Protein backbone atom coordinates (compact mmCIF):
# COMPACT_ATOMS: atom_id res chain seq x y z
CA UNK A 1 0.00 0.00 0.00
CA UNK A 2 1.29 3.40 -0.89
CA UNK A 3 0.51 6.33 1.34
CA UNK A 4 -2.21 8.61 -0.05
CA UNK A 5 -0.64 11.74 -1.40
CA UNK A 6 -1.44 15.12 0.01
CA UNK A 7 -3.77 16.86 -2.36
CA UNK A 8 -2.25 19.84 -4.13
CA UNK A 9 -4.93 22.29 -5.18
CA UNK A 10 -4.59 24.76 -8.04
CA UNK A 11 -3.85 28.34 -7.19
CA UNK A 12 -4.09 31.32 -9.52
CA UNK A 13 -1.00 33.39 -10.21
CA UNK A 14 -0.91 36.37 -12.51
CA UNK A 15 2.60 37.61 -11.79
CA UNK A 16 5.67 36.11 -13.49
CA UNK A 17 6.88 33.02 -11.68
CA UNK A 18 10.40 33.83 -10.59
CA UNK A 19 11.88 30.44 -9.88
CA UNK A 20 12.73 28.58 -13.06
CA UNK A 21 11.25 25.27 -12.08
CA UNK A 22 11.90 23.60 -15.44
CA UNK A 23 12.43 24.39 -19.11
CA UNK A 24 10.45 21.35 -20.28
CA UNK A 25 6.70 20.85 -20.40
CA UNK A 26 4.53 17.97 -21.53
CA UNK A 27 1.12 18.90 -22.86
CA UNK A 28 -0.96 15.80 -22.40
CA UNK A 29 -3.93 14.45 -24.28
CA UNK A 30 -6.93 12.58 -22.96
CA UNK A 31 -6.57 9.30 -21.02
CA UNK A 32 -3.55 10.41 -19.03
CA UNK A 33 -4.91 12.23 -15.99
CA UNK A 34 -4.37 9.39 -13.56
CA UNK A 35 -1.21 8.33 -15.32
CA UNK A 36 0.28 11.78 -14.83
CA UNK A 37 -0.66 11.96 -11.17
CA UNK A 38 0.13 8.39 -10.18
CA UNK A 39 2.95 7.23 -12.42
CA UNK A 40 4.91 10.16 -13.83
CA UNK A 41 6.21 11.49 -10.53
CA UNK A 42 5.17 13.64 -7.59
CA UNK A 43 2.97 16.69 -8.08
CA UNK A 44 4.63 19.41 -6.01
CA UNK A 45 2.44 22.32 -7.11
CA UNK A 46 -0.50 23.11 -9.36
CA UNK A 47 -0.97 26.48 -10.93
CA UNK A 48 -3.68 28.13 -12.98
CA UNK A 49 -1.91 30.91 -14.80
CA UNK A 50 -3.70 34.12 -15.71
CA UNK A 51 -2.59 35.32 -19.12
CA UNK A 52 -3.61 38.14 -21.50
CA UNK A 53 -5.72 35.46 -23.22
CA UNK A 54 -7.55 34.16 -20.17
CA UNK A 55 -6.68 31.43 -17.69
CA UNK A 56 -4.60 28.41 -18.60
CA UNK A 57 -5.52 24.86 -17.76
CA UNK A 58 -3.99 23.92 -14.37
CA UNK A 59 -0.25 23.30 -14.81
CA UNK A 60 1.23 20.50 -12.72
CA UNK A 61 4.73 21.05 -11.31
CA UNK A 62 6.20 17.55 -11.20
CA UNK A 63 9.30 15.84 -9.86
CA UNK A 64 10.68 12.39 -10.46
CA UNK A 65 13.99 11.91 -8.69
CA UNK A 66 16.14 14.84 -9.79
CA UNK A 67 14.00 15.49 -12.85
CA UNK A 68 11.66 18.45 -12.79
CA UNK A 69 9.07 19.15 -15.44
CA UNK A 70 5.65 20.65 -16.07
CA UNK A 71 2.58 18.74 -17.18
CA UNK A 72 -0.29 20.64 -18.74
CA UNK A 73 -3.36 18.45 -19.35
CA UNK A 74 -4.99 20.38 -22.16
CA UNK A 75 -8.48 18.89 -21.73
CA UNK A 76 -8.72 19.63 -18.00
CA UNK A 77 -6.81 18.54 -14.98
CA UNK A 78 -8.80 15.61 -13.60
CA UNK A 79 -11.13 14.48 -16.33
CA UNK A 80 -11.84 15.03 -19.99
CA UNK A 81 -13.87 18.19 -19.68
CA UNK A 82 -12.75 20.67 -22.34
CA UNK A 83 -13.09 19.28 -25.87
CA UNK A 84 -10.52 20.22 -28.48
CA UNK A 85 -12.32 23.21 -30.11
CA UNK A 86 -12.70 24.87 -26.70
CA UNK A 87 -9.18 24.43 -25.34
CA UNK A 88 -7.61 27.84 -24.73
CA UNK A 89 -4.44 27.07 -26.68
CA UNK A 90 -3.17 30.64 -26.53
CA UNK A 91 -3.46 30.83 -22.74
CA UNK A 92 -1.86 27.40 -22.29
CA UNK A 93 1.20 28.06 -24.43
CA UNK A 94 1.58 31.60 -23.08
CA UNK A 95 1.43 30.29 -19.50
CA UNK A 96 4.22 27.81 -20.22
CA UNK A 97 6.34 30.54 -21.83
CA UNK A 98 5.90 32.72 -18.73
CA UNK A 99 6.96 29.79 -16.57
CA UNK A 100 10.24 29.67 -18.49
CA UNK A 101 9.47 26.70 -20.73
CA UNK A 102 11.69 26.37 -23.83
CA UNK A 103 10.69 22.85 -24.94
CA UNK A 104 7.22 21.39 -25.26
CA UNK A 105 6.47 17.74 -25.97
CA UNK A 106 2.82 17.33 -26.91
CA UNK A 107 1.13 13.98 -26.40
CA UNK A 108 -1.79 13.17 -28.62
CA UNK A 109 -3.95 10.10 -29.24
CA UNK A 110 -5.11 10.35 -32.86
CA UNK A 111 -6.94 7.87 -35.07
CA UNK A 112 -5.15 6.12 -37.92
CA UNK A 113 -6.32 6.49 -41.51
CA UNK A 114 -4.98 3.09 -42.56
CA UNK A 115 -4.13 -0.29 -41.07
CA UNK A 116 -0.45 0.47 -41.68
CA UNK A 117 -0.59 1.63 -38.06
CA UNK A 118 -1.26 -0.56 -35.03
CA UNK A 119 -3.47 0.54 -32.14
CA UNK A 120 -1.08 1.66 -29.41
CA UNK A 121 1.73 2.32 -31.90
CA UNK A 122 3.92 5.35 -31.18
CA UNK A 123 4.47 7.82 -34.01
CA UNK A 124 6.55 10.98 -34.23
CA UNK A 125 4.49 12.97 -36.76
CA UNK A 126 6.46 14.91 -39.36
CA UNK A 127 3.87 17.32 -40.69
CA UNK A 128 0.43 18.82 -40.16
CA UNK A 129 -2.69 19.44 -42.22
CA UNK A 130 -4.72 22.06 -40.38
CA UNK A 131 -8.50 21.79 -40.88
CA UNK A 132 -9.46 23.64 -37.71
CA UNK A 133 -11.83 26.56 -38.03
CA UNK A 134 -12.74 29.31 -35.65
CA UNK A 135 -9.89 28.74 -33.20
CA UNK A 136 -7.74 31.68 -32.13
CA UNK A 137 -4.64 30.62 -34.01
CA UNK A 138 -2.17 33.47 -33.53
CA UNK A 139 -0.97 35.89 -30.87
CA UNK A 140 -0.52 38.61 -33.48
CA UNK A 141 -4.00 39.66 -34.55
CA UNK A 142 -3.34 43.23 -35.62
CA UNK A 143 0.42 43.48 -35.57
CA UNK A 144 1.39 42.80 -39.16
CA UNK A 145 3.78 40.02 -38.20
CA UNK A 146 3.72 36.32 -37.51
CA UNK A 147 4.48 35.27 -41.08
CA UNK A 148 6.62 32.35 -39.95
CA UNK A 149 8.03 29.41 -41.89
CA UNK A 150 6.64 25.99 -41.03
CA UNK A 151 9.20 23.78 -42.69
CA UNK A 152 9.56 21.68 -40.72
CA UNK A 153 6.50 22.41 -38.54
CA UNK A 154 8.00 20.57 -35.55
CA UNK A 155 11.32 20.95 -33.73
CA UNK A 156 14.17 18.85 -35.13
CA UNK A 157 16.13 18.87 -31.86
CA UNK A 158 13.22 17.33 -29.96
CA UNK A 159 12.55 14.90 -32.80
CA UNK A 160 16.13 13.64 -32.56
CA UNK A 161 15.94 13.25 -28.78
CA UNK A 162 12.52 11.57 -28.80
CA UNK A 163 13.52 9.34 -31.70
CA UNK A 164 16.69 8.20 -29.94
CA UNK A 165 14.88 7.51 -26.67
CA UNK A 166 12.14 5.51 -28.38
CA UNK A 167 14.56 3.63 -30.63
CA UNK A 168 16.54 2.63 -27.53
CA UNK A 169 13.28 1.31 -26.05
CA UNK A 170 12.76 -0.70 -29.28
CA UNK A 171 9.64 1.29 -30.12
CA UNK A 172 11.05 2.49 -33.49
CA UNK A 173 8.40 5.15 -34.10
CA UNK A 174 7.53 6.13 -37.65
CA UNK A 175 8.77 9.63 -38.36
CA UNK A 176 7.15 10.41 -41.71
CA UNK A 177 3.47 10.54 -40.77
CA UNK A 178 1.21 13.47 -41.63
CA UNK A 179 -1.25 14.40 -38.88
CA UNK A 180 -4.49 16.06 -39.97
CA UNK A 181 -6.16 18.27 -37.37
CA UNK A 182 -9.95 18.37 -37.50
CA UNK A 183 -12.07 20.88 -35.64
CA UNK A 184 -14.16 18.38 -33.68
CA UNK A 185 -15.48 17.57 -31.19
CA UNK A 186 -17.38 15.29 -33.57
CA UNK A 187 -15.47 12.57 -35.38
CA UNK A 188 -14.99 12.50 -39.14
CA UNK A 189 -17.54 11.27 -41.67
CA UNK A 190 -16.54 8.36 -43.94
CA UNK A 191 -16.20 10.81 -46.85
CA UNK A 192 -13.93 13.06 -44.78
CA UNK A 193 -11.77 10.08 -43.92
CA UNK A 194 -11.42 9.22 -47.62
CA UNK A 195 -10.61 12.86 -48.40
CA UNK A 196 -7.91 13.03 -45.72
CA UNK A 197 -6.27 9.90 -47.11
CA UNK A 198 -6.26 11.34 -50.63
CA UNK A 199 -4.66 14.50 -49.27
CA UNK A 200 -1.80 12.53 -47.78
CA UNK A 201 -2.78 12.33 -44.13
CA UNK A 202 -1.88 9.26 -42.06
CA UNK A 203 -3.40 10.21 -38.71
CA UNK A 204 -6.32 12.37 -37.69
CA UNK A 205 -6.77 14.15 -34.38
CA UNK A 206 -8.02 17.46 -33.05
CA UNK A 207 -5.35 19.10 -30.96
CA UNK A 208 -1.95 19.84 -32.47
CA UNK A 209 -3.17 22.98 -34.25
CA UNK A 210 -2.96 25.78 -33.43
CA UNK A 211 -0.83 24.59 -30.47
CA UNK A 212 2.28 23.90 -32.59
CA UNK A 213 1.99 27.20 -34.46
CA UNK A 214 1.51 29.19 -31.24
CA UNK A 215 4.62 27.61 -29.73
CA UNK A 216 6.65 28.74 -32.74
CA UNK A 217 5.28 32.29 -32.38
CA UNK A 218 6.68 32.30 -28.85
CA UNK A 219 9.97 30.71 -29.98
CA UNK A 220 9.40 27.47 -28.07
CA UNK A 221 10.59 24.10 -29.40
CA UNK A 222 7.57 21.83 -29.91
CA UNK A 223 7.20 18.23 -30.99
CA UNK A 224 4.29 15.80 -30.74
CA UNK A 225 4.34 12.19 -29.61
CA UNK A 226 1.30 10.41 -31.00
CA UNK A 227 -0.05 7.05 -29.83
CA UNK A 228 -2.68 5.59 -32.12
CA UNK A 229 -5.92 5.10 -30.19
CA UNK A 230 -8.33 3.98 -32.91
CA UNK A 231 -8.98 3.60 -36.61
CA UNK A 232 -10.85 6.40 -38.35
CA UNK A 233 -14.35 5.71 -39.67
CA UNK A 234 -14.45 2.93 -42.23
CA UNK A 235 -10.77 1.93 -41.89
CA UNK A 236 -11.12 -1.15 -39.66
CA UNK A 237 -13.31 -2.45 -36.85
CA UNK A 238 -11.48 -3.40 -33.67
CA UNK A 239 -12.74 -5.28 -30.64
CA UNK A 240 -13.21 -2.63 -27.95
CA UNK A 241 -11.66 -4.67 -25.13
CA UNK A 242 -8.52 -5.44 -27.11
CA UNK A 243 -8.29 -1.82 -28.18
CA UNK A 244 -8.33 -0.66 -24.55
CA UNK A 245 -5.60 -3.17 -23.65
CA UNK A 246 -3.34 -1.98 -26.49
CA UNK A 247 -3.83 1.66 -25.53
CA UNK A 248 -3.12 0.92 -21.86
CA UNK A 249 0.07 -0.91 -22.85
CA UNK A 250 1.20 2.15 -24.80
CA UNK A 251 0.35 4.56 -21.99
CA UNK A 252 2.29 2.40 -19.54
CA UNK A 253 5.41 3.26 -21.55
CA UNK A 254 4.90 7.01 -21.39
CA UNK A 255 6.58 7.53 -17.99
CA UNK A 256 9.76 5.76 -19.12
CA UNK A 257 9.77 7.69 -22.41
CA UNK A 258 9.36 10.91 -20.42
CA UNK A 259 12.13 10.19 -17.92
CA UNK A 260 14.57 8.94 -20.54
CA UNK A 261 13.83 11.97 -22.70
CA UNK A 262 14.54 14.33 -19.79
CA UNK A 263 17.87 12.56 -19.22
CA UNK A 264 18.87 12.69 -22.87
CA UNK A 265 17.70 16.16 -23.84
CA UNK A 266 20.57 18.18 -22.26
CA UNK A 267 23.09 16.13 -24.27
CA UNK A 268 21.23 16.41 -27.59
CA UNK A 269 22.94 18.52 -30.24
CA UNK A 270 20.71 21.51 -31.15
CA UNK A 271 19.35 21.03 -34.68
CA UNK A 272 16.63 23.68 -34.85
CA UNK A 273 16.05 27.41 -35.08
CA UNK A 274 12.81 27.45 -33.05
CA UNK A 275 14.24 29.91 -30.53
CA UNK A 276 15.02 32.35 -33.33
CA UNK A 277 11.70 32.12 -35.15
CA UNK A 278 10.93 35.81 -34.49
CA UNK A 279 14.48 36.97 -35.15
CA UNK A 280 13.78 38.90 -38.36
CA UNK A 281 11.15 40.99 -36.57
CA UNK A 282 13.62 41.67 -33.78
CA UNK A 283 16.32 42.65 -36.28
CA UNK A 284 13.97 45.11 -37.95
CA UNK A 285 13.26 46.64 -34.56
CA UNK A 286 9.57 45.71 -34.75
CA UNK A 287 9.61 43.80 -31.46
CA UNK A 288 11.81 43.86 -28.36
CA UNK A 289 13.39 40.77 -26.81
CA UNK A 290 10.69 40.43 -24.13
CA UNK A 291 7.85 38.37 -25.60
CA UNK A 292 5.34 39.99 -23.25
CA UNK A 293 5.62 43.14 -25.34
CA UNK A 294 4.87 41.39 -28.63
CA UNK A 295 1.10 41.47 -28.28
ZN1 LIG B 1 13.58 23.48 -31.56
Image (cartoon, helix red, strand yellow):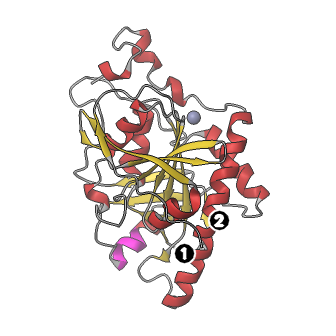
Looking at the image, is 182 positioned above or below residue 63? below
SS category of the residue bearing label 2: helix
Please name the residue shown 71% across and 57% down the image: 166
Q: Is residue 21 magenta?
A: no
SS category of the residue bearing label 1: loop
Image quarter hosting the N terminus: bottom right
The foreground one among 130 and 213 is: 213
The label nearer to you, 1 versus 2, is 2
Image quarter hosting the C terminus: top left
Which residue is identified by label 1?
114
The answer to whether residue 81 is seen in the rendering is: yes
Q: In the image, which residues are magenta?
A: 190-195
Identify the main secondary structure in magenta.
helix
| Earlier sequence position, callout 1 versus callout 2 | 1
Within the image, what quadrant is residue 31 found in?
bottom left
Looking at the image, is 248 positioned above or below residue 78? below
The answer to whether residue 49 is seen in the rendering is: no
Looking at the image, is 170 positioned above or below residue 271? below
Within the image, what quadrant is residue 268 found in?
top right
| Rendered image: mark on residue 253 | 2
Amino acid sequence: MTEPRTEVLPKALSIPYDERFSEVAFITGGKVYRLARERLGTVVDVLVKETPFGCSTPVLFMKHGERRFYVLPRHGEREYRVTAPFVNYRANVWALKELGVRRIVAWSGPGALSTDFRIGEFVLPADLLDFTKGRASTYFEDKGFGILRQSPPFCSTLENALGQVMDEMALTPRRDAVYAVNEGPRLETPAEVRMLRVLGADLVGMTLAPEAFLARELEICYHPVAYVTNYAEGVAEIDEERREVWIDEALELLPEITWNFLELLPTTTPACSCEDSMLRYKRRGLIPDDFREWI
